[in-house]
Structure formats: C-alpha cells, structure tokens
Image (tube, rainbow, N blue to C red):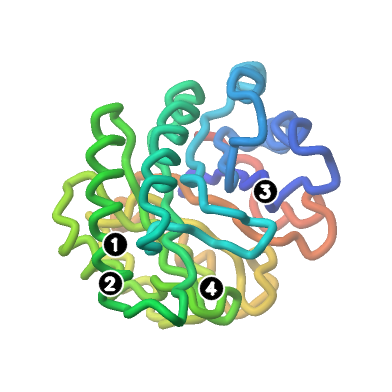
C-alpha cells in the first residue's frame, strides 16, 4: 500500500491550521503537505513536524496573490524577478522543514501575451529553479491542472508536462501527478503513471466528480493503489481532497494500518 500524506490545506479544516499537524498525526498520518508555508514562522512549523513525528512531504513555490485569483507566476514575463525571489524563499522554508520536493504552479495564461512567449518564460524560470533547488538537494515538480476548476491554467495534460520537461532539460525537474486533475483532462490513469513512472516524483488524489475522498466518485482507487505498488512507485500519495463531511468521518476509506510510512 502506498504511503499517504495529509494535505493540511484541504484536510482537518475543522481546526486552525497549526492544530492540523496534531490531528493528522493522531489520525495515523506520517507525512503532511500543504499549499504554502510562508505566512507562518518556519521554526514554528518545524517544531510542529518534530513534535508530532511528521515528514514534510511537499509545499509549493510562492504563487503570486492567491486571494486575488492568481495561481502561479512562472509563465509571466513581467514577474521573473519575483519568481526568482520566491525560489529562494522556498529554499529557505524547505531547508528548515526538511522538505525534499517543491511544486511549481505555473499560472493562468494571460490573454494579451503570446503563448510562445509564456512557454519561453516558463522554461527559463524552471531551469533557474531546478538548478537552485538542486544545490540544496530539493527536487522541483510541475503539476498539470484541469481547466474546469482553473480555467486558462497553462499546464493541463501529462503530454504537455512531458514536453516541458524535455525543453527544460534538467535532471531535477519532475511531474506532480494529480489523479483528480488528470481523470478530468485525460483519464487512462494507470497506464499513464506506469509509462512515465521515472518522471513522476509525487502523486496526489481526490475522487471525481466533487473532489471528495476516495470512494465517493468514479475512480477505482483500490485498483490504483495495487497498481502503484506493482509498478514500484516509491513516493508519497498526497490526500488533496475536500472531505464530504468532516475529515475524520471521511477517513473510513483507508484502514489506519496503511497510513504509516
């Protein structure tokens, strides 16, 4: 059975953020991830991880003004210096938290900029980030996201992500494969993961439709768990879903014996 990490942005929302570490540990999780650590003191976060014996599996690079609807700045030609500053901020946090992989949300494509220029900006930014993160032993990930939930998101398929990795030409750039997003955009989950296993560093899950916990929708998760084991996937699986009721009620989809690393 894969190792499952609680996404603290999505799970345990019944509690203030800093109390979710304890809740995740008491539920049996040994790994956690979340969107962004930057509004919290890095030493406070590291202390929570240590106290509850949790591994920080993943967080994202700074992604612009999230509250205003931005979903990444890596494609924006006029935000390059901001992107680069964000890389160093992410390194600072990831180093303190012991986090070995950081995801880049590439952003929503502006309608007034030619797509080729957006792609060129993204490639150059990813080369920069992959190099700087590699110096600290941190992997860089990029995530294709469905255009139903985020209309206009620039990176939205496995094929596009693979081509992007080829263009960047860095051994330190990988795919974050979100089962929910890719079920919406392309399906064929098992074969896609297997065919590109060496380029996928992290997997996330939620069921479809609804983005709720496994077992609430159309995806055959028990089969996918067995498949991940069979093909030798060694990474974590981030539980990035919206609980249909409370988080604890929703965890009945997974026996507690499968949560430990």
Disc 1 to disc 2: CB gap under 8 Å: yes
- Residue 119 sits in quarter: bottom left
Q: Which residue is mark 3?
A: 9
Q: Which residue is mark 1?
A: 121
Q: CA distance from mark 1 to mark 2?
A: 6 Å
Disc 1 to disc 4: CB gap under 8 Å: no
- Residue 44 sits in quarter: top right
Disc 3 to disc 1: CB gap under 8 Å: no
Q: Nearer the viewer, residue 255 or 148?
A: 148
In this view, the mark in front (1 or 4): 1
In this view, the mark in front (3 or 4): 3
Q: Secondary structure at mark 4?
A: loop
- Residue ID at (70%, 72%): 216
- The numbered mark at residue 220 is 4
- Residue 256 sits in quarter: top right
Residue 37, placed above or below residue 121: above
Q: Nearer the viewer, residue 108 or 190?
A: 108
In this view, the mark in front (3 or 1): 1
Residue 258 shows up from this direction: no
Residue 183, placed above or below residue 104: below
Q: Is residue 196 left or right of residue 71?
A: left
Label 1 neighbour load within 10 Å: few <14, some 14-19, many 20+: some
Q: Position of residue 158 (x, y in %)?
A: 33, 72
* Labels 3 and 1: the sequence-earlier one: 3
Q: Secondary structure at mark 1?
A: helix
Q: Which residue is mark 2?
A: 117
Q: CA distance from mark 3 to mark 1?
A: 29 Å
* Labels 4 and 2: the sequence-earlier one: 2
Q: Nearer the viewer, residue 72 or 159?
A: 72
Q: Secondary structure at mark 3?
A: loop
Label 3 neighbour load within 10 Å: few <14, some 14-19, many 20+: some
Q: CA distance from mark 2 to mark 3?
A: 32 Å
């Amino acid at each position: 059975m894969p190792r499952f990490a609680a996404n603290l942005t999505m799970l345990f929302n019944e509690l203030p953020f800093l109390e979710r570490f304890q809740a995740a540990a008491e539920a049996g999780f040994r790994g956690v991830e979340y969107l962004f650590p930057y509004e919290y003191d890095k030493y406070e976060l590291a202390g929570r991880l240590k106290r509850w014996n949790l591994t920080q599996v993943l967080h994202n690079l700074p992604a612009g003004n999230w509250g205003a609807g931005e979903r990444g700045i890596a494609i924006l030609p006029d935000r390059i210096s901001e992107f680069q500053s964000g890389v160093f901020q992410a390194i600072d946090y990831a180093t303190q938290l012991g986090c070995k992989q950081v995801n880049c949300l590439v952003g929503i494509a502006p309608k007034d900029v030619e797509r080729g220029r957006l792609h060129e900006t993204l490639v150059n930014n990813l080369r920069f980030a992959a190099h700087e993160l590699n110096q600290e032993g941190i992997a860089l990930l990029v995530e294709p996201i469905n255009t139903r939930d985020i209309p206009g998101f620039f990176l939205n398929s496995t094929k596009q992500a693979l081509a992007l990795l080829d263009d960047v030409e860095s051994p330190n750039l990988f795919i974050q494969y979100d089962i929910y997003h890719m079920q919406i955009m392309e399906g064929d989950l098992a074969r896609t993961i297997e065919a590109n296993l060496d380029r996928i560093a992290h997997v996330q899950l939620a069921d479809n439709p609804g983005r709720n916990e496994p077992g609430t929708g159309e995806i055959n998760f028990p089969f996918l768990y067995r498949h991940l084991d069979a093909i030798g996937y060694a990474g974590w699986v981030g539980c990035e879903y919206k609980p249909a009721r409370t988080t604890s009620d929703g965890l009945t989809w997974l026996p507690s014996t499968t949560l430990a690393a």
